[in-house]
Amino acid sequence: MEVFDTKDIAEVLKNRFIVIIGDSIQRTIYKDLVLMLQENRPLSKTELKCKGEFSFLGDELIEGGKKSKMTNGISYKEVRQYQTDVHLVRFYFMTRCYNSYLESILKDLKEGPSLDVLIMNSCLWDITRYGRDSIKDYKDNLQKLFPRFLQCLPVECLVIWTTTLPISSSARGGFLVPEIEFMSSTLRLDILESNFYAKMLAADHGFDVLDLHFYLRHYLHWRVDDGIHWDMAAHRYITNLLLSHICDAWNIPMPAKARATFCSYGSAAGVRKRSNYDSSVHAPSNYYNRFNTANIPGFENYFSNYHNSQRNWTSQFENQNSWNENTTFGNSWNNLWNGPCQQQTALWNGPNPNDIHKFSQNNLRILSNMSASIQTTINSCQQVFNQIQNFHWQSYQQEQYQSVVPHKRHLKKQGNPYSRQRRY
């Protein structure tokens, strides 16, 4: 399902600073966003699997990754950034939602350019790689995280917390090192609990929530073999969900080819309308004229023909006597309207008293038939009720019971024809 293309996303995120924080799923969201800013194609399998590379489609590896030791532990770091004259997208890899490393990230964001959108998720590493009390510590860290966002981030920054995607009961690899593979069978339930807690806590602090677990619960065929990560179709779907959420939050119109706004489940963006909305800031003056259907294959003249047909229909419907064989609908429709179909003409010019009388007679006949059928049904129910009242339970007589199946002592034992034992 394609909703946004390169031209749309370039216009929506023009002069915006976007930051994505999270694990490998969030990194792939960052990669798909960078790809959409340049090309109209999905991610390849190689691009999905790569991590820590020095450059991806023109972006830059700032810290961690292949610049340092590549590990699968909680100390792994990776900071990437894609920058042009009008776009700035940055990614931070994290294994815990709140720690000293997050405080350093908040310090960088506070000292850097004004942040417009922050997209974050952190769950799988938090509840699996930090000891037996990892779920309790995860909840405590969330209670520290969101107040810090309120203190450090700009008021106009759009914070979107994305819920963790569903994983398989037989997940393997990634953060699931061999020492904790036994948790894969129950990890799905822990994710549900963590998503619910994080969602409620984010909403209480006034932040938006995009429930990706809700949206992709019926698209498990997009999940790859390891049971954790997702393919290119799923990530393009997630990117469209995020862009739709951003447009909804900033009151930017959706592209003309979009069928409907997504309005994410559990989101505050569709409910909270910003009182200080300024169309000159969020939507340029030429933004509403950008959506030209001529660039969409198969829709070159769709809307123009549609509006012309609507105008022809309105003008001809107001004056049906002016219809002729040159109208939009042809001579057959003209004959149907002014020719044999006199009842429609009568209804158009005004109700006919004879028709009203016939209509009333028909209704009376139908009502009488209905009353007769209802009375018949009532009588039948009364008979059944009388039969139930006259019914008497008969006592069960044990001595009349006769067994149909013969006793086991009368059954002849079947011997084994291949046995060496002598049979009599």
Image (cartoon, grey):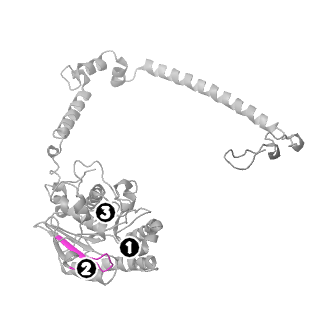
Q: Nearer the viewer, mark 1 or mark 3?
A: 1
Residue 177 is labelled as 1
Name the amino acid type tagged 2: Ile
Q: CA–CA distance between discs 2 and 1?
A: 27 Å
Q: CA distance from mark 2 to mark 3?
A: 29 Å
Left or right for 299, reference 1: left
Q: Residue furthest top?
A: 340
- Mark 1 is surrounded, within 10 Å at the Cα level, by few (under 14), some (14 to 19) or many (20 or more) other residues, namely some
At x 24%, y 53%, the residue is 254
Q: Name the one closer to the observer, 83 or 166.
A: 166
Residue occupied by mark 2: 105
Q: Earlier in the sequence, mark 1 or mark 3?
A: 1
Q: Nearer the viewer, mark 2 or mark 3?
A: 2
Q: Secondary structure at mark 1?
A: loop
The x, y position of residue 100, in whole percent, is: 31, 84
Say few, some or many: other residues with alpha carbon within 10 Å of mark 2 (under 14 / 14 to 19 / 20 or more): few
Residue that numbered label 3 is attached to:
273
The local secondary structure at tag 3 comes to loop
